[in-house]
Image (spheres, helix red, strand yellow):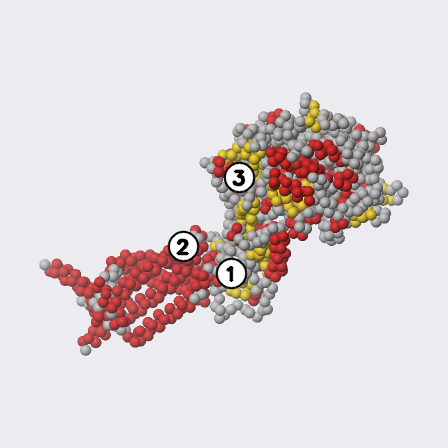
């Protein structure tokens, strides 16, 4: 564990003047590639995730759709999203595995106020270090994909870890291991992009002219990528954002606002001190004497 | 009332004030730690960072309760009126320490009134935004965009409030004899005559009426 | 499966019809995806619903539940009339050229030989014309009006695209698109695989559904080809093994028949069971029947089976009528049965018409349930309000619930759909008092034997003479059992040249070594070779794939004799030239056939007259099924017993299957469109395995509560929103479930009238970790397929109401 901390590329709540260890050479970036076009929505990934991570969501209800659990939660780190799209008389059932995208520029990490509660590994994995998490939920607001969830039981943030424990010992994430159709693949980001290219070419040959890779620039690219048949319209896949970015409010809050506030404090204190030195105290007793004299 | 002293703050108002001060302190220190992660050590005010996150909103509510007391006690005196106009026109002189020469202040001067409304306003923003962003109880009930906006507004108003409170504290420190008023409830007639002559006159008018009633 | 899972990757077209492979077989479906990615294969899904399979398919075509034969006969009509079939294959390897008796006929919905009074067929006219030597007459030119080809052509000519649209509700354009996809694989170097499952079998015409596709695959030349075949995807992990080992009412291991009352002695039985060769110079491998059967008797009775006592033949039961599961429940309801031993079967949940099952079980004196989880069957007497509205005080059945192990809690073999017999090892012992099924059964058997020894009884030999040579009598090991199944030599065996093949006591390595003289024992002839003198073949784990076609001959072991693709001789023409050089499995090396698979053939050289379907009397694939099917030698569309149109556009006088399995009492519980206007169909979801996994929290999390799928049009008509509670009623009862309103179910225009389909998954009940719910089989009718007695779960009538 302590050696692993040398692989942190970024660490939440950490001053730029005191960055995480930098001595180690950069590792290969990893990526999970989810090929939506060959996903059958079997939810094996959901179950594998629950099994590997010892997560047990409460048994819920059917609310008129296939999704269950209905949403991500502190006990559900990935869910299948099902969308029925009918266009030109042709029905498509778009099924997308939802969960953390492991952004290269993670909004959660940027928003997090707790030093070392969110880290970005050199291989690209964005992980929550729970012992440092304070449960403030800032990460929730920093995420462009609405992924982190705060547990109501222990008041800490949770999301997919990309099975960092498995990956760090050379295994693929549990969902990848279990996926029966190989719709989820794992490897270096470069390799996965190559696999994606082949898949996209194949999809285009089948008439999906807009097939493409979802690796959004706005968050510096992601370490979970999708092959989409309709890459021009990612919103079809349960509202996958077309051009996700860290919200500008977060940029302001975690950026310029902090030095501005510091300056504000400094100026106020300085003004008070200078004022006091210049004008001195106003003491009614002294004042009385002054007037008398 | 004694010859030297006049009553300025009731017991309830003083309790309200110091309750607000105390809760403001712990909430501010923990809040600063959330705002400036490098000041994480400030969360030690509550023991651990997790406890700080847990208790910050609770003490925030306590602070708001204190503010409510102060609001009720002071709102009647905090209405700006035409008598406050000279204060604004002479603000430079006032800063030079010549307030008593240029304006005749009643119970509160215009600066205090403005600070009052600033604190109340920021307090209102803080409580509303704080509750909306409160994990894990209320935040999940709101859209993330709303929570995000609330967190930023919360920080903005918190910083503004802190700056306001610094000014407030400095003023109390600058005008000697002020702090005792908030501790013991009384100020010297000299202090009152200097800073709030109009208020003192009204007090003394009341005292005269009272004593004449007694003598008759 | 004629082929196997990995082989699906070699297909050019994958037809998912009568099943939902992605949903019910997600792991095996990887090979369909593999074909799509690496072989540019197309996937065609023909299903009433837009399923998970359809989600990754190139085309989805809708049809009304229970009309698959119409659709497929329509495809046949298209292929034949557009010359889209593999002509050489049809001529050489099918019975297209065989002449059929002149008195065979089909008229107004009935084949010749129908006896209205007995409600059954005299099948004697369903046969070939034979020459003086007893061989079938042929016309290789396919010109003769009585040849199978011309009869087939005539039979399917009624299934025009218009008729398909009228009966199935499939728009003609969609149907023709599907036909074109089928037709592309008529090319010798293109293959289509058919993946089907319970969507075909669980119909009153289930077996005929499959046969129709088999005819298509034969005329397209796709049987025996890598990437082809007719592939049953088995619903339970070892249901293939169950069928192989003959756990059925009238079967013995290895697809041998249980004697009936006409088989008065061994010789009669063997004479009637062993088919005669009907093609000159053919193999007729079933001619070896006596070897398999007598080796089985030796396995059953050991030294007690001697030539003098006909190898114990008379200790076998001889059935008068078939006591299949449906009749068993019927007899139980009639009070004709006292005790019921249920092993790994949730009768109440899985038999149709749950109320009937409950009525039946309530009449029993005792019920023994061997199950790893608390099932509805073991608890059928508990009141669970609406979900199980029974009065426990009125039920006198004594229930014994014996906890058993799950597959991962014991060593053993599982036979997959592709006939691969794969060994597995115990991962953990069963929890609590759980025991393996074999230990439970053996203990019961030993107790019964003890009672027979002490007290005697009727035909005690049946029990007392059974060979039971296990080291632990009350707990035979899986190894001992499978070695017994494989078979061994009971004496030194010599071949025709006098060479010693096996020493006494050695394991046989092939069924070719079995003898009819009692010198071999074999518990299931097709499994001979799974545990040889070389050891456990099922435990082999070599992933080498020398052909690149996915045969992997060193991985586990496949029956028969490790053959991966059945009828593989048919992948080449008569001269041994492969239809597609890229799919060459076998070649003639000058002395024998050899290659990447075990030849399904004899040593006959290229160009010989020996036909490739060596299990058949005439050696060819049958477009005309002779007397093997109950309804007729060709397949014909019959409406489901509960038909939404109430007529049969092809022949209004014969609406439903004349030979359907239906008891009088159940006939009274059928509904019609007046009260039940919508078509109900049941199915499974990926998230659950039948009614077992509702006991598992992880599965319960992913699909927690019962629901029904309805179309947007039906929802609008009945003012139902997604998530509303609805009541679905049939003539048998009602269930209340959540509504899932979806575009994936659509209204169909059938016979000129709009028809709605109500989809009913089956995974919930009144026991388990899921939300308590109704058993879906409250709704389903107790009707059986004419051939297999498989219940009709896929097409029946229901009504739908919103529960306010």
Which element carries disc 1, helix, strand or loop?
helix
Q: Residue furthest top?
A: C117
Whether residue C660 is situated above or below residue A196 in the rendered picture: above
Quarter of the rendering containing residue C60: top right
Looking at the image, can residue C58 be seen?
yes
Quarter of the rendering containing residue C103: top right
- Report the residue marked by disc 1: A218
Say which chain tag 3 marks: C
Q: Nearer the viewer, mark 2 or mark 3?
A: 3
Q: Residue at x 23, y 61 (%)?
A: B81
Q: Residue at x 47, y 61 (%)?
A: A111
Q: Same chain for marks 2 and 1? A: no
Whether residue B59 is situated above or below residue C312 in the rendered picture: below
Find residue C788 and report its horizontal and vertical position in percent.
68, 33
Find residue A269 and report its horizontal and vertical position in percent.
35, 71
- Report the residue marked by disc 2: B132
Q: Residues within 10 Å of mark 1 (few under 14, many from 20)?
A: some
Quarter placement of the C terminus of chain A: bottom left
Say which chain tag 2 marks: B
Say which chain tag 1 marks: A
- Report the residue marked by disc 3: C711
Q: Are marks 1 and 3 in contact (CB under 8 Å)?
A: no
Find residue C293 and report its horizontal and vertical position in percent.
78, 35
């Amino acid at each position: 564990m302590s050696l692993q901390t040398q692989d942190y590329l970024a660490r939440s709540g950490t001053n730029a003047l005191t960055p995480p260890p930098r001595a180690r050479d950069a590792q290969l970036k990893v990526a999970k590639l989810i090929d939506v076009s060959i996903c059958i929505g079997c939810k094996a990934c959901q179950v594998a995730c629950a099994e590997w991570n010892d997560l047990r969501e409460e048994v819920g209800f059917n609310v008129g759709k296939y999704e269950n659990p209905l949403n991500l939660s502190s006990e559900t780190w990935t869910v299948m999203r099902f969308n029925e799209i009918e266009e030109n008389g042709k029905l498509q059932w778009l099924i997308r595995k939802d969960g953390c995208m492991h952004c290269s520029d993670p909004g959660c990490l940027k928003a997090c106020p707790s030093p070392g509660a969110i880290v970005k590994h050199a291989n690209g994995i964005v992980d929550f270090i729970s012992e440092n998490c304070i449960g403030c939920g800032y990460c929730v607001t920093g995420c462009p994909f609405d992924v982190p969830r705060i547990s109501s039981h222990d008041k800490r943030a949770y999301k997919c870890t990309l099975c960092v424990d498995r990956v760090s010992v050379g295994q693929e994430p549990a969902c990848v291991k279990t996926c029966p159709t190989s719709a989820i693949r794992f490897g270096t980001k470069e390799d996965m992009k190559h696999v994606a290219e082949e898949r996209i070419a194949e999809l285009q040959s089948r008439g999906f002219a807009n097939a493409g890779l979802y690796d959004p620039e706005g968050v510096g690219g992601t370490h979970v990528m999708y092959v989409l048949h309709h890459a021009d319209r990612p919103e079809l896949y349960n509202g996958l954002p077309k051009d996700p970015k860290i919200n500008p409010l977060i940029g302001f809050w975690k950026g310029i606002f902090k030095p501005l506030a510091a300056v504000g404090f400094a100026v106020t204190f300085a003004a008070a001190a200078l004022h006091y030195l210049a004008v001195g105290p106003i003491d009614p007793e002294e004042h009385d004497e002054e007037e008398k004299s | 009332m004694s010859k030297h002293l006049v009553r300025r703050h009731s017991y309830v108002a003083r309790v309200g004030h110091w309750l607000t001060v105390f809760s403001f302190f712990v909430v501010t220190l923990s809040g600063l730690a959330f705002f400036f992660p490098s000041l994480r050590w400030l969360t030690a005010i509550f023991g651990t960072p997790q406890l700080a996150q847990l208790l910050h909103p609770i003490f925030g509510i306590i602070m708001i309760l204190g503010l409510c007391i102060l609001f009720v006690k002071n709102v009647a005196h905090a209405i700006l009126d035409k008598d406050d106009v000279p204060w604004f026109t002479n603000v430079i002189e006032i800063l030079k320490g010549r307030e008593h020469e240029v304006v005749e202040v009643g119970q509160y001067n215009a600066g205090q009134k403005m600070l009052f409304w600033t604190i109340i306003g920021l307090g209102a923003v803080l409580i509303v935004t704080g509750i909306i962003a409160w994990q894990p109880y209320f935040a999940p009930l709101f859209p993330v965009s709303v929570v995000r906006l609330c967190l930023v507004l919360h920080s903005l108003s918190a910083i503004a409030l802190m700056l306001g409170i610094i000014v407030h504290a400095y003023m109390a420190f600058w005008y000697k004899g002020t702090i005792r008023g908030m501790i013991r409830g009384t100020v010297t007639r000299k202090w009152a005559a200097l800073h709030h002559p109009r208020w003192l006159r009204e007090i003394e008018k009341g005292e005269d009426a009272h004593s004449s009633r007694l003598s008759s | 499966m004629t082929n196997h899972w990995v082989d699906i990757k070699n297909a050019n077209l994958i037809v998912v019809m009568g099943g939902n492979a992605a949903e019910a077989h997600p792991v095996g479906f990887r090979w369909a995806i593999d074909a799509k990615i690496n072989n540019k294969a197309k996937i065609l899904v023909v299903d009433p619903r837009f399923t998970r399979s359809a989600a990754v398919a190139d085309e989805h075509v809708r049809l009304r539940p229970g009309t698959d034969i119409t659709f497929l006969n329509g495809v046949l009509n298209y292929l034949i009339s557009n010359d889209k079939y593999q002509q050489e294959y049809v001529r050489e390897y099918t019975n297209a050229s065989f002449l059929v008796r002149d008195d065979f006929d089909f008229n107004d919905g009935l084949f010749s030989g129908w006896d209205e009074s007995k409600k059954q067929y005299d099948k004697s006219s369903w046969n070939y014309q034979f020459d003086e030597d007893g061989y079938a007459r042929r016309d290789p030119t396919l010109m003769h009006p009585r040849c199978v080809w011309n009869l087939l052509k005539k039979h399917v000519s009624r299934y025009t695209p218009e008729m398909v649209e009228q009966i199935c509700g499939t728009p003609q354009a969609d149907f023709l698109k599907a036909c074109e996809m089928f037709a592309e694989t008529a090319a010798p170097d293109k293959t289509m695989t058919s993946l089907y499952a319970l969507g075909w079998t669980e119909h009153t015409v289930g077996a005929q559904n499959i046969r129709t596709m088999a005819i298509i695959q034969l005329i397209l030349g796709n049987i025996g080809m890598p990437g082809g075949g007719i592939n049953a995807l088995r619903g339970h992990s070892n249901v293939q093994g169950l069928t192989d080992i003959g756990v059925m009412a009238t079967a013995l291991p290895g697809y041998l028949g249980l004697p009936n009352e006409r088989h008065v002695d061994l010789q009669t039985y063997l004479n009637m069971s062993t088919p005669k060769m009907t093609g000159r110079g053919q193999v007729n491998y079933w001619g070896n029947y006596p070897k398999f059967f007598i080796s089985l008797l030796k396995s059953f009775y050991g030294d007690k089976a001697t030539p003098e006592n006909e190898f114990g033949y008379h200790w076998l039961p001889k059935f008068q009528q078939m006591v299949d599961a449906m009749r068993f429940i019927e007899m139980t309801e009639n009070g004709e049965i006292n005790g019921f031993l249920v092993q790994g079967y949730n009768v109440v949940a899985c038999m149709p018409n749950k109320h009937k099952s409950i009525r039946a079980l309530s009449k029993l004196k005792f019920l023994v349930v061997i199950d790893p989880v608390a099932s509805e069957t073991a608890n059928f007497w508990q009141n669970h309000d609406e979900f199980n509205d029974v009065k426990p005080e009125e039920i006198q059945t004594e229930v014994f619930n014996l906890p058993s192990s799950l597959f991962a809690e014991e060593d053993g073999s599982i036979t997959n759909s592709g006939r691969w017999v794969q060994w597995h090892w115990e991962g953990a012992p069963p929890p609590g008092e759980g025991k393996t099924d074999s230990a439970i059964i053996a203990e019961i058997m030993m107790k019964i034997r003890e009672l027979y020894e002490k007290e005697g009884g009727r035909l005690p030999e049946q029990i007392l003479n059974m060979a039971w040579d296990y080291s632990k009598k009350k707990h035979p090991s899986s190894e001992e059992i499978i070695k017994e199944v494989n078979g061994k030599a009971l004496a030194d065996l010599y071949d025709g040249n006098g060479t010693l093949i096996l020493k006494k006591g050695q394991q046989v390595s092939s069924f070719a070594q079995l003898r009819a003289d009692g010198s071999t024992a074999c518990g299931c002839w097709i499994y001979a070779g799974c545990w040889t003198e070389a050891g456990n073949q099922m435990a082999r784990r070599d992933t080498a794939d020398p052909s690149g076609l996915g045969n992997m001959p060193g991985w586990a072991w496949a029956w028969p004799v490790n053959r991966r693709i059945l009828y593989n001789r048919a992948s080449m023409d008569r001269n041994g030239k492969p239809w597609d050089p890229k799919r060459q499995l076998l070649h003639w090396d000058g002395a024998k056939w050899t290659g990447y698979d075990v030849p399904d053939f004899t040593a006959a050289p290229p160009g010989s007259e020996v036909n490739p379907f060596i299990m058949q009397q005439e050696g060819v694939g049958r477009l005309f099924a002779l007397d093997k099917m109950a309804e007729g030698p060709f397949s014909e569309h019959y409406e489901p017993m509960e038909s939404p149109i109430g007529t049969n556009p092809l022949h209004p006088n014969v609406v439903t299957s004349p030979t359907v399995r239906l008891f009088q009492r159940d006939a009274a519980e059928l509904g019609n469109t007046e009260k039940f206007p919508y078509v109900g169909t049941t199915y499974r979801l990926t998230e659950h395995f039948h009614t077992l996994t509702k006991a598992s929290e992880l599965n319960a999390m992913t699909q927690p509560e019962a629901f029904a799928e309805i179309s947007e049009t039906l929802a609008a008509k009945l003012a139902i929103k997604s998530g509303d509670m609805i009541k679905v009623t049939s003539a048998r009862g009602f269930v209340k479930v959540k509504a899932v309103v979806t575009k994936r179910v659509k209204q169909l225009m059938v016979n000129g009238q709009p028809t709605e389909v109500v989809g009913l998954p089956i995974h919930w009940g009144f026991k388990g970790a899921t939300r308590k719910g109704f058993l879906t089989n409250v709704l389903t009718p107790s009707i059986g397929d004419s051939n297999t007695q498989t219940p009709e779960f896929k097409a029946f009538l229901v009504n739908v109401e919103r529960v306010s």
